[in-house]
């Protein structure tokens, strides 16, 4: 069954955000499949991004690669960790190119910027050039993580958001915020409206990995966790609506 389209909003919403980073997992692109890319799902997420871009918000993105290959899983199966991580980085480039194609099909100019140089496929990461793309209204998709093994795309997202001077990181997940336990397994799970970085770390809550949370805390960069499965959710939060959790200083 195809994903529902994002409903059009006749009234332009107002937002205080000028520049944000959207982080999504590679699994978010699978739809109801068990592996790979589901084109209708990729297009639905692209429409979500376009709806926010239409508000005048500058958007950069980081997409994981777990729908194709995850370095930790490869390492757990006996593969050398560095090699497995590089394979995972290449998977993120594939996802970024798919999202670029979907966004440009909607008329949104997009640049894929890779931490690993591959000039025939995408641009190399140069911070000042990436900032200029954002200023010109282009969506920048940062691929290949940080370009180094042993770092997750969560850490890459926090690093790029800090370098781009983003005002917040939006974490698109399958749940509508941060809970004290898995809401899919526990009916009494409690959702937090606001929670501090230190609480996330001490309570071992699954928002981002510890390195990413520490980096966000050091740069006082808010993290907004919301459900990517809710149509219009990304735009709604920017307009001050919807259900989400803010991880704050």
Image: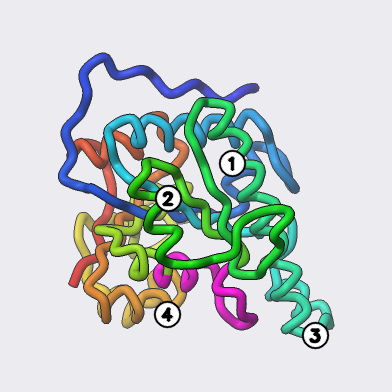
For the point 16% across and 33% down, the residue is: 14
**Left or right, residue 219 beside residue 87:** left
Mark 4 or 3, nearer chain start: 3
Q: What is the distance, in whole Å, between disc 2 and disc 1 at their CAs?
A: 14 Å
The quarter of the picture where the N terminus appears is: top right
Q: Earlier in the sequence, mark 2 or mark 3?
A: 3
Q: Residue at x 74, y 62 (%)?
A: 69
Q: Which mark is residue 80?
A: 3
Q: Between residue 206 and residue 224, name the one nearer to us.
A: 224
Q: Is residue 148 magenta?
A: yes
Q: Earlier in the sequence, mark 3 or mark 1?
A: 3
User: Which numbered circle lies on residue 133?
Assistant: 2
- Report if residue 220 is visible in the image: yes
Q: Which residues are magenta?
A: 145-159
**227 inside magenta stretch:** no
Answer left or right for 61 relative to 35. left
Identify the secondary structure beneath mark 4: helix
Q: Residue at x 20, y 60 (%)?
A: 194
The residue that appears at 41% across and 34% down in the rendered structure is 230
Q: CA distance from mark 2 to mark 3?
A: 36 Å
Outermost residue, top direction?
10
Residue 244 location (% of width, % of height): 28, 48
Mark 2 falls on what kind of element?
A: helix
- Vertical order, 119 against 97 (above or below): below
Residue 220, position as x, y percentages in the image: 22, 73
Foreground disc of the pair 2, 3: 2
Check whether the beta carbons of the residues at disc 4 and disc 2 lie within 8 A of each other: no
């Amino acid at each position: 069954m195809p994903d529902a389209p994002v409903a059009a909003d006749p009234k332009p919403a107002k937002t205080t955000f000028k520049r944000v980073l959207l982080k999504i997992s590679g699994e978010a692109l699978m739809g109801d499949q068990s592996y790979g890319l589901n084109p209708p799902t990729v297009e639905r997420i692209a429409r979500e991004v376009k709806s926010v871009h239409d508000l005048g918000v500058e958007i950069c993105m980081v997409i994981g690669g777990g729908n194709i290959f995850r370095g930790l899983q490869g390492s757990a199966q006996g593969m050398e960790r560095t090699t497995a991580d590089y394979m995972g980085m290449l998977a993120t480039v594939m996802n970024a190119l798919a999202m670029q194609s979907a966004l440009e099909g909607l008329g949104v100019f997009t640049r894929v910027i890779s931490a690993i140089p591959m000039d025939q496929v995408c641009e190399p990461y140069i911070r000042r050039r990436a900032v200029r793309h954002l200023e010109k209204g282009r969506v920048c998709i940062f691929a290949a993580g940080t370009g180094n093994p042993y770092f997750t795309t969560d850490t890459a997202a926090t690093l790029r958001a800090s370098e781009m001077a983003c005002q917040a990181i939006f974490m698109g997940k399958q749940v509508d915020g941060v809970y004290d336990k898995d809401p899919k397994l526990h009916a009494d799970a409690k959702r937090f409206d606001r929670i501090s970085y230190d609480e996330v770390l001490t309570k071992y809550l699954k928002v981002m990995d510890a390195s990413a949370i520490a980096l966000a805390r050091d740069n006082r960069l808010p993290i907004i966790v919301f459900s990517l499965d809710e149509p219009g959710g990304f735009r709604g939060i920017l307009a001050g609506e919807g259900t989400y959790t803010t991880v704050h200083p």
